[in-house]
Image: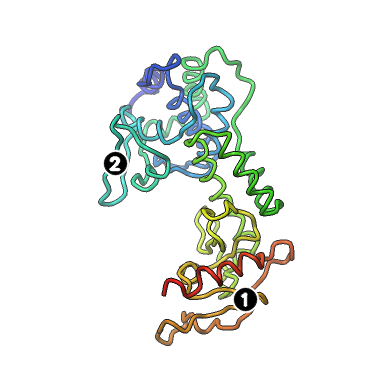
Amino acid sequence: MEPLNYYLLLFTKLRRAPQYGGAPHKPVLLLSILDAVERGYISNERIFITLELVALFRSNWKIWVKTPHIENLALPFFHLKNEPFWKLVTKPNRVIPVTSKNSISSLDVLRQFVDYALIDKSLFQYMLNEVDRELLRNALLKRYFGDVPRYNFSSTIYLDEVAEQIVEESAVQYKRRIDRLRQEESEETFEEEVYIRSNVFKREIPRIYNHTCCISGLQVQLTGKHALIDACHIKPFSEEHDDTIGNGLALCPNLHRAFDKGLITIGDNYNVIVSSQFIESESLYSINQHKNKKIILPNNSRFYPRKEVLEWHRDVVFEKWL
């Protein structure tokens, strides 16, 4: 096991692009990982790109970075591979495509090809220890942000703000907000914003539907971070930038896939419409058994799926790809 001083030294000698006095991306990501470990979001030496980590990275960036650098979590997550304590683990049979500058092009590409980063087991043990974690944090702050007073701390409050917007705002209000963010933010930062909002949508829709598939009635609520009930966009985000509750359904994975492929749709009376253009064997899991069934709706009528997006799905998706 390497001594703590070994990692303190490595943390103060990070390889960084020299622009504007040195890129802050690696220190900000490491600060965010320390914060995530402290809050219990990271429980072992495998570092995944998660909603909470992205939110902490954004929060730390706003607190500590005062230079014109562009916020981009993909860069440090990828380039920390050049540090002795960080190893990228790619997904099976995947090779990370790099740019002409031997970098990563986007967060989306990183997530497609990289499963997680693996840090030294001994480093993670130091991160778990409150005293050692504070020494690592102070080493980063003093070396890279020494002129910035430490009176603010990172948080994931932004996730609650996004959740409130998704639940409370109309589709028109929400689209205006997204359009404004697209205009105001860099391409890289907007990509992070979309990632956050997409994952908050995935969290909120099952919650609104009490973790129940609205067609089959299957209810599964896990104590961990994984879920078996999907959040399904009725109208894809790419069409209208709409992550609001009224554009979502809670579906089990097989019915989610059937809905996206146009095998099923939902009528104006919230009844299930099943296409006649496919053949299936008799089974407990058959799609046809749900024909004409009324879906299970949220307790609050404000959160019912909007009829105009259901109509769009019937007109544009249903039976169009069969």
- Residue under label 2, please give it: 97
Q: Position of residue 288 (x, y in %)?
A: 50, 83
Q: Position of residue 209 (x, y in %)?
A: 64, 64
Front-most of 8 and 95? 95
Residue farthest toward the front in the current orientation of the protein: 315
At label 2, the amino acid type is: Pro
Quadrant of the frame with the C terminus:
bottom left
Report whether 124 appears left or right of 312: left
Seen at 52% across and 24% down, the residue is 134
Residue at image x 60%, y 43%?
179
The image shows residue 127 at horizontal and vertical percentages of 46, 31
Locate residue 193 relative to residue 22 in the image: left or right: right
Of mark 1 and mark 2, the one earlier in the sequence is: 2
User: What residue lies at 70% left-to-right and 62% top-to-bottom?
Assistant: 303
Kindly identify which numbered label has been placed on residue 45.
none
Find residue 313 and report its horizontal and vertical position in percent. 55, 68
Distance from Cα at disc 1 to Cα at disc 2: 44 Å
Of 308 and 15, the residue lying toward us? 308
Q: Residue furthest top?
A: 147
Applied colour scheme:
rainbow
Mark 2: secondary structure: loop
Front-lying residue, 230 or 198? 198
Q: Which of label 1 and label 2 is nearer to you?
A: 1
Query: Which element is circle 1 on?
Result: loop
In the rendered image, which quarter is residue 86 located in?
top left
Residue type, mark 1 in image: Gly
Please give the label number shown on residue 267. Answer: 1
- Looking at the image, the residue that sits furthest to the bottom is 282
* Residue at point 56%, 72% (across, down): 314
